[in-house]
């Protein structure tokens, strides 16, 4: 139940982020660029569309210099400047938007960070109040509480309590409460607050690390180490790197909050302008915050800026507790940018290390599968199983069995495929793989058909499973049962080569030769060379000649 609430809260945050960090301002007073600045603006837009953020930011800077009050240019300049790290341009563009009262809501976060870094407390409080009046209203009370602690102008916990309590605000307010209790010397109260909040998710890990650093900063190394107990590699590294801990001030509190928000908003493949701004602001307050650096690198990578993301990762020093995570992120960026060989080499180095984990071997296996190196992938998955026998779940069994099957070693694959189904008897993916692998080889057809029928009951709208079951029917001579399913699957996946070919074969078996050739031609459109040759033979001579 708690996990479900966290997921739903994160979903709401992501929707909120999309609204806050929209790429354009809905209503702008200025006209589109004209005259001398138009050329620079057009080039910048073209570069923006191509993902060339550096070129785009430079173009927007030129256009804004030519027309300093133009909000149309300014909003694009603001976002591109944040993406490339040109904070001077970001501030200049934001000033234009503020002057016209069309600044995006998240712009106040950058202003807040600047004011805190410069110790301009009144201006920082004004920015926090502005944040608290917008869509990020739940952030304002937390920031004001940290400012109250910094300036010693009242009770920071009372400021926190004054904020309105909805589901999102309570979550972040309670985390801030624990940290502010530590900072205020209320150690016992802080421990009780933490006890009700800490779990095994990434957000709890961030909170655990922040709290431990504050306890260490107050000289309570015992509590700090207790918070960092366990064998998680990041926790172990943080425990070893505690040192003197952290001073509790507004910069620490705001940076911690910004990183927490960025972590909640980060996804594996979606770019987020708000994550970029949050992490840039956190790094203004705490330039050594490697967690912020990695979240920023991930966000830039998601937006297609792989080279810039890799340059950020290079800033994480080898002695940092986050260095292993940085290198693992580097693997993912190599893969995303198409440098699969570099990704495999780095993953292989990790997997061969003395302290390598099952996950390291599993990552290597996944990369080898994507490179069609199935036999090596099977070995990597075997290593993962050997390192953590209790962690050999149905997915890992399916991955190992699938790699062996693709490597042409089906006899070795079969026990792992069966074990995957045994561990997860209601997982359509496992049922489909085992069932179809046997159907393809004409093995155990009644049992394979039963597996596929169950898979389709569990996931009736999956065209791949529908095709698998239909093909089992074809193999068993039940063509009349197969045809409606294949036709349904083709409608769902009209460009799938295998489904179209299966449909053609079934039409041929039913004596519908014209429709069979039509389906094979449809399959040929997207087929590779080997498949094209087989399909050409079918088009010329029918099924029997192509075997």
Image: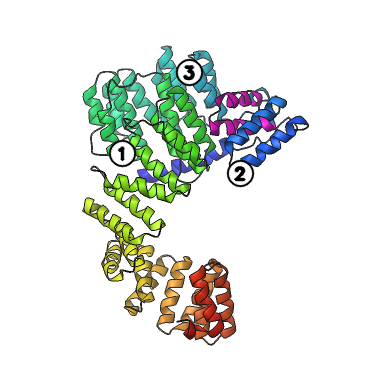
How far apart marks 3 and 2 lie (CA) works out to 36 Å
Residue 154, visible in the rendered structure = no
Which structural element holds mark 3?
Answer: helix
Residue on which disc 3 sits? 116
Range of residues picked out in magenta: 72-97
Q: Left of 101 or right of it: where is 491?
A: left
288 or 15, which lies in front?
288
How far apart marks 1 and 2 lie (CA) works out to 42 Å
Q: Earlier in the sequence, mark 1 or mark 2?
A: 2
What colour scheme does the image use? Answer: rainbow
Outermost bottom residue:
511
Q: Does residue 87 show up magenta in the picture? A: yes
Residue on which disc 1 sits? 199
Residue on which disc 2 sits? 50
53 or 395, which lies in front?
53
Which structural element holds mark 1?
Answer: loop
Q: Position of residue 494 (x, y in %)?
A: 56, 68
């Amino acid at each position: 139940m708690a996990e479900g609430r966290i997921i739903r809260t994160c979903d709401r945050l992501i929707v909120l982020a999309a609204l806050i960090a929209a790429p354009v301002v809905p209503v702008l007073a200025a006209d589109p660029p004209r005259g001398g600045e138009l050329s620079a603006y057009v080039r910048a837009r073209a570069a923006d569309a191509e993902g060339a953020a550096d070129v785009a930011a430079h173009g927007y800077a030129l256009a804004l210099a030519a027309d300093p009050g133009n909000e149309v240019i300014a909003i694009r300049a603001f976002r591109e400047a944040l993406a490339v790290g040109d904070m001077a341009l970001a501030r200049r563009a934001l000033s234009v938007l503020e002057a016209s009262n069309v600044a995006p809501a998240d712009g106040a976060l950058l202003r807040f960070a600047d004011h805190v870094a410069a110790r301009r407390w009144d201006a920082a409080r004004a920015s926090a109040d502005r944040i608290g009046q917008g869509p990020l209203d739940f952030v304002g009370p937390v920031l004001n509480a940290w400012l109250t602690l910094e300036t010693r102008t009242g009770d920071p916990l009372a400021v926190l309590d004054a904020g309105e309590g909805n589901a999102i605000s309570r979550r972040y307010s309670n985390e801030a409460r624990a940290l502010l209790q530590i900072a205020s010397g209320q150690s016992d109260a802080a421990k009780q607050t933490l006890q009700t909040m800490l779990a095994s998710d990434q957000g709890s890990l961030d909170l655990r690390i922040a709290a431990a650093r504050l306890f260490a900063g107050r000289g309570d190394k015992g509590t700090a180490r207790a918070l960092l107990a366990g064998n998680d590699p990041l926790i172990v590294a943080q425990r070893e790197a505690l040192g003197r801990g952290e001073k509790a001030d507004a910069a620490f509190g705001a940076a911690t909050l910004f990183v927490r928000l960025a972590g909640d908003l980060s996804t594996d493949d979606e770019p987020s302008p708000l994550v970029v701004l949050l992490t840039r602001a956190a790094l203004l307050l705490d330039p050594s915050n490697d967690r912020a650096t990695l979240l920023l690198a991930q966000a830039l990578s998601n937006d297609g800026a792989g080279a810039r993301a890799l340059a950020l990762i290079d800033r994480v020093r080898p002695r940092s507790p986050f260095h292993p995570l940085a290198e693992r992120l580097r693997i993912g960026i190599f893969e995303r940018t198409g440098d699969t060989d570099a990704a495999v080499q780095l993953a292989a180095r990790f997997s061969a290390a003395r302290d390598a984990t099952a996950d390291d071997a599993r990552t290597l296996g996944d990369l080898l599968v994507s490179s069609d190196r199935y036999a090596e992938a099977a070995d990597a998955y075997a290593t993962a199983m050997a390192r953590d026998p209790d962690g050999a779940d149905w997915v890992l069994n399916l991955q190992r069995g699938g790699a062996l099957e693709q490597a042409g070693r089906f006899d070795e694959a079969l026990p792992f495929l069966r074990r995957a189904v045994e561990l997860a008897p209601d997982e359509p993916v496992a049922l489909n793989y085992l069932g179809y692998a046997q159907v393809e080889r004409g093995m155990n057809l009644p049992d394979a058909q039963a597996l596929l029928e169950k898979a389709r009951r569990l996931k009736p709208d999956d065209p791949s499973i529908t095709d698998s079951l239909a093909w089992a029917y074809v193999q068993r001579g039940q063509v009349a049962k197969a045809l409606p399913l294949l036709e349904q699957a083709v409608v769902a996946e009209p460009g799938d080569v295998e489904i179209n070919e299966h449909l053609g074969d079934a039409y041929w078996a039913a004596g519908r030769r014209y429709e069979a050739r039509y389906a094979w031609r449809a399959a040929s459109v997207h087929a590779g060379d080997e498949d094209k040759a087989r399909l050409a033979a079918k088009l010329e001579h029918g099924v029997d000649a192509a075997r």
